[in-house]
Amino acid sequence: MADRGEDLRAFLASAGWGAARRAPLAGDASTRHYIRLHLNGRTAMLMDQPQAAEAPPAPAHATPEERRALGYNAIARLAGADTGRFVAASNYLRARGLSAPDIYAADTNEGFVLMEDLGEALYSDALMGGADEMALYGAAIDALSSLHAEGAPAALAPDKPLHPYDETALIAETDLMTEWFFPVGLGRSATADETQTHRRLWREALDAVTAASPVFVHRDYHAQNLIWLPAREGVARVGLIDFQDAVAGAQAYDLISLTEDARRDVSPELGEAMTRRYLDRMRAQGMPLDEAAFRAAVAVFAAQRNAKIVGIFSRLYRRDGKPRYLGYLPRVWGYLNRDLEHPVLAKLKAWYDRAIPREKRGAPRIEGASV
């Protein structure tokens, strides 16, 4: 049986890149690996996603009970190791004039994708280098509003339905707070009553704001997944990556992914300016939003996302031995504390104030851990 290295060499050879020099990129929280390829003055990007590295995603028509039996990827509507979903999403985005990578070749059975190299100017790096924050964020909002000019498709490809970001997925994500942050941040497990009450209050909050027509939700639309392409024009100046977990969900979700970024500080003033720009762009496209309802949705999905991230980063430390993620918790808790001030979240705010003291909402002190 051929090993993965041999499979990779065969894939590159068949795509005409067998002689390329390989430069692996630094890893992140996922099981995917990326390699920049250099060949005769050209570059390309290789995604290497081992197929046995993750639990399977949910079948198209799986019930909530069937998804729970398959594990977290299926419950939360994550793509897992399904590189075919990345290919389908990239094709969908490019067809709408957005700068997702062109796909040169793919072997989705083995988990190899050869694609366009959009360069190294990640928003996070460009901004650290002095790029105009308002210009870059404004372009990202324009790309987002352009994407939202139409509703979510039923499918990205005939065999790749765009799953709804449903209550089962959203509640599974907020459950990460009680499952993983409590042991790390409070030094104890959440009680059954705490877990059930937290879950019930989140259902109530989400039920109040999830009635709007769904759109394509990137799900991780932030500065480390956007690439600045100033040589291109209009919305194509924003390069998009890491969208394989896309779902059909709320318009507010990607906006707050951008403006409440776990890995970099985004000021309330910039967040407000971008919210205002989004509302203005949607109005200019002939799709005006009820501003009060939209701002309530922004608060709820911001809080939901930040509660999830607190749980995920705690899990990355406790389960996966990655203590550096604890260093992001003070920023994420800062966003979450602010989100909970919205009246639509009054009951959840009261729960958090009872269950998690303010002084515990940050990076826990872990002996021997460098964060």
Image (spheres, rainbow, N blue to C red):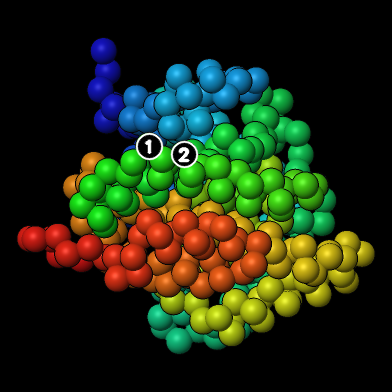
Q: How many marks?
A: 2
Instruction: Sort mark 2 into few (<14), some (14-19) or many (20+) by Cα contacts within 10 Å.
Output: some
- Residue 267 location, x and y as percent? 51, 81
Q: Secondary structure at mark 1?
A: helix
Picture layout, residue 232 above or below residue 27: below
Residue ranking furthest to the left: 368
- Residue 332 location, x and y as percent? 41, 66
Please indicate whether residue 166 sits to the left or right of residue 353 in the image.
Answer: right
Residue that mark 2 sits on: 196
Residue 363 visible within the image: yes
Q: Amino acid at mark 2?
A: Gln
Residue at 71% in and 25% down: 158
Please indicate whether residue 37 sits to the left or right of residue 227 in the image.
Answer: left
- Residue 368 location, x and y as percent? 7, 60
Residue 229 visible within the image: no
Quadrant containing the C terminus in the rendered view: bottom left
Residue at 50% in and 61% down: 350
Q: Secondary structure at mark 2?
A: helix
- Residue 305 location, x and y as percent? 51, 55
Q: Do callouts 1 and 2 mark residues in contact (Cβ within 8 Å)?
A: yes
Residue that mark 1 sits on: 192
Instruction: Sort mark 1 into few (<14), some (14-19) or many (20+) by Cα contacts within 10 Å.
Output: few
